[in-house]
Image (cartoon, rainbow, N blue to C red):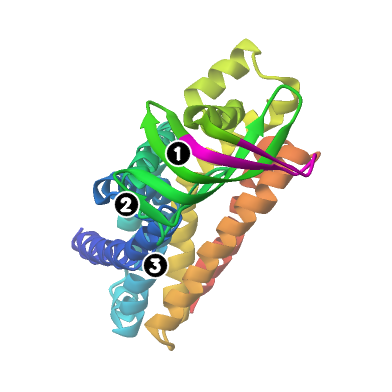
């Protein structure tokens, strides 16, 4: 029992450190990337966006941090000769995996719940965020030093006074029943404002260049609006895809036969793919423990780098190859979803057996 508690304590400390270190490195990059996409966005909106980003990354970051902490713990056991002491005490080496396996199970259940229930809802939260961020950018736009681009709408202005933009270049998407065309225009003055989910702009001394007729069209006033929600709603037509649905809804549609035939494999694959997010912790436990023990003669940094490589390779293969095989090949969807985990599990078992016998 003391051994289990000892390893558990070491593992939890290493895991918390790994998560904290990753957040310390990742958060500034996330913030910079968001500010680059939405210059002058309000700081309060940015803070609202961070939980969405963290939640979307958690199912991929937590397993990797768990493997890194496992490598650190078992690598230190081997380096400090404690692993030899465990052997000499007559304790079976596999017993050292008991407490990490309990942690793996708890983290696996948490991750499985997240990918099954929470992550599919993130798109709707991102939609609300983008609308609020757009309003914030419009309110804080500084003409002459920045530009505003929302989808196909672009505004560049030379001056601003009392909320009106002067000497402005405008590019927008002109949509009618037959076609959609990007239009270029210039205006002496432009007013912008947000009303609900619409961005309105009213241009004065408006000059439009029609690329088809090659003729300039002028008017004293021109007003148009961009349906920001509609722009997102067009994307929401793809929300019928399995990755945007909670697992209970996928099962319901499969049971009632509501799934379109061309999406049947996609729905079946997604249920199994989400289940692999539970199993991945046990795979990474074996890989991490084996790596730490086998590289006892090397450096901890080297072992951590190797384990990180394992994790990245697994994600690439599982999300790319697994998806392709599960949705588009002749393999059963469940096999495509589980193939990378099954192969990785075989490799992990072979490595842990070698590490224990070494």
Name the residue at 80% across, 39% down: 213
Q: Main secondary structure of the magenta part?
A: strand
Name the spot of residue 75 as percent of width and height, x first.
37, 77
> Which span of residues is magenta-colored?
202-218
Camera-side residue: 260 or 35?
Answer: 35
Q: Which mark is residue 103?
A: 2
Name the residue at 60% across, 42% down: 207
Crowding around mark 1 (Cα neighbors within 10 Å: few <14, some 14 to 19, many 20+) is many
Residue underneath mark 1: 115
Q: Quadrant of residue 258?
A: top right
SS for callout 3 = helix
| Vertical order, 137 against 240 (above or below) | below
SS for callout 1 = helix
Name the residue at 47% across, 34% down: 202
Camera-side residue: 167 or 83?
Answer: 167
Name the spot of residue 209 as percent of width and height, x first.
68, 44
Q: Mark 1 vs mark 2: which is more N-terminal?
A: 2
């Amino acid at each position: 029992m003391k051994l289990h508690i000892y390893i558990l304590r070491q593992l939890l400390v290493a895991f918390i450190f790994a998560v904290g270190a990753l957040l310390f490195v990742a958060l500034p990059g996330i913030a910079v990337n968001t500010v680059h996409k939405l210059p002058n966005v309000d700081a309060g909106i940015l803070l609202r966006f961070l939980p969405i980003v963290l939640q979307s990354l958690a199912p991929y970051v937590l397993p990797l941090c768990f493997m890194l902490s496992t490598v650190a713990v078992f690598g230190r056991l081997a380096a400090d000769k404690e692993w030899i002491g465990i052997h000499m005490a007559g304790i079976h080496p596999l017993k050292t995996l008991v407490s990490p396996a309990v942690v793996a199970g708890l983290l696996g259940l948490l991750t499985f719940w997240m990918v099954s229930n929470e992550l599919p809802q993130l798109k709707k939260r991102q939609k609300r965020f983008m609308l609020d961020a757009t309003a914030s950018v419009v309110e804080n736009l500084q003409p002459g030093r920045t530009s505003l681009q929302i989808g196909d709408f672009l505004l560049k202005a030379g001056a601003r006074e009392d909320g009106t933009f002067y000497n402005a270049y405008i590019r927008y998407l002109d949509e009618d029943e037959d076609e959609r065309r990007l239009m270029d225009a210039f205006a002496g003055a432009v007013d912008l404002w947000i009303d609900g989910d619409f961005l309105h702009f009213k241009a004065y001394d408006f000059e439009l260049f029609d690329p088809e007729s090659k003729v300039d069209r002028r008017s004293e006033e021109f007003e148009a609006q961009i349906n920001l929600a509609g722009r997102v709603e067009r994307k929401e037509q793809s929300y019928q895809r399995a990755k945007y649905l909670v697992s209970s809804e996928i099962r319901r549609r499969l049971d009632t036969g509501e799934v379109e035939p061309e999406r049947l494999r996609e729905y079946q694959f997604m249920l199994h793919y989400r289940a692999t997010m539970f199993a991945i912790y046990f795979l990474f436990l074996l890989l991490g423990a084996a790596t730490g023990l086998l590289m006892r003669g090397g450096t901890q940094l080297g072992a951590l780098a190797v384990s990180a490589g394992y994790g990245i390779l697994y994600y690439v293969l599982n999300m790319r190859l697994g998806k392709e095989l599960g949705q588009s090949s002749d393999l059963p969807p469940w096999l495509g979803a589980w193939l990378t985990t099954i192969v990785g599990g075989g490799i992990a078992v072979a490595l842990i057996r070698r590490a224990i016998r070494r």
